[in-house]
Image (cartoon, helix red, strand yellow):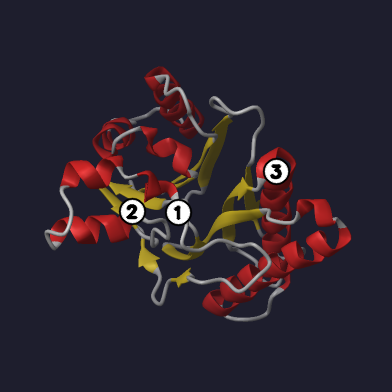
Amino acid sequence: MPRKVATAQITGARDCQEDTLAVHALAAEASVRAGDLLLVLADGMGGHAGGEVASRLVVDCFCATYSSSPKVVSEALRSSLEAANECLTDAVLDAPELTGMGATLVGCVIRENSLSWVSVGDSPLWVCRGSQLLRLNADHSMVPLLEDMVRTGLMEREVAQADPRRSLLRSALTGKTVALVDLCDKPFQLVCGDIVMLASDGIETLAEDALVALLQNAGPVSLDELAGKLLAAVEAVAASHQDNASVILYRC
């Protein structure tokens, strides 16, 4: 399977970039996980300095731990997530002014035609297959709970969509106990033409149908161009409080 990857970021209306991305093709001479393609994205929180530091720390620690782990993929993903969370504990002990920082994290591994992942927070992991946009990982924001209230008749959809709690996280890496972790129990099987996308929640300025329209009509466009078009579309909305937006794209 040809491995084609692209990344892109915008700061949006923010003063700095608090998202961190990493792409590693692990070679035999460098890792016990030879042949794995590791894609990792974190969205930091905790103020300008804290968010930027947190996202960088968790991504660096996650990648280093995964590349040296002799465990099976799912266990290596979990131990890498735990190490990333612990590194925040250590960082705050060294620099108490960073207390309160944290990050979401989604890390996925592509091995041949299978995709495995672990995630905490609301950063989405999608696969675009034809006209379908499949979200693979859990959303640890308040959005699923509000949608459940709509489905059960406890809340009107318009009220749920305007609810200020939508962006609140139920789980994140903060150096403390992690409330919710999504670790895939069975690898997702990719097919030729699939586009895998990891993103920070800033991409969700675009509705899913807009994302699908851009992804499924990519044709011969390079992934670099496609990543640029996605973020240009986000910027074109000109949202007054546009968050940082980052994407990692992989095409089979």
CB atoms of marks 3 and 2 within 8 Å: no
**Nearest-to-viewer mark from 2 and 1:** 2
The residue positioned 38% from the left and 62% from the top of the image is 138
- Residue 167 or residue 72, whichever sits in front: 167
The residue positioned 74% from the left and 56% from the top of the image is 99
SS type, badge 3: helix
Furthest toward the right, the residue is 94
Residue 168 horizontal/vertical position (percent): 45, 52
What type is the residue that disc 2 sits on? Answer: Val
Q: Residue 131: in sight, yes or no?
A: no
Sort mark 2 into few (<14), some (14-19) or many (20+) by Cα contacts within 10 Å. Answer: many
What type is the residue that disc 1 sits on? Answer: Asp
Residue 72, by quadrant, is bottom right
CB atoms of marks 2 and 1 within 8 Å: yes
Q: Is residue 45 above or below residue 154?
A: above
Q: CA distance from mark 2 to mark 1?
A: 9 Å
Q: Is residue 196 left or right of residue 77?
A: left
Q: Is residue 88 left or right of residue 82?
A: right
Q: According to the image, label 2 marks what residue?
A: 143
Furthest toward the left, the residue is 153
Residue 198 horizontal/vertical position (percent): 47, 48
Q: According to the image, label 1 marks what residue?
A: 122
- Residue 71 or residue 48, whichever sits in front: 48
SS type, badge 2: helix
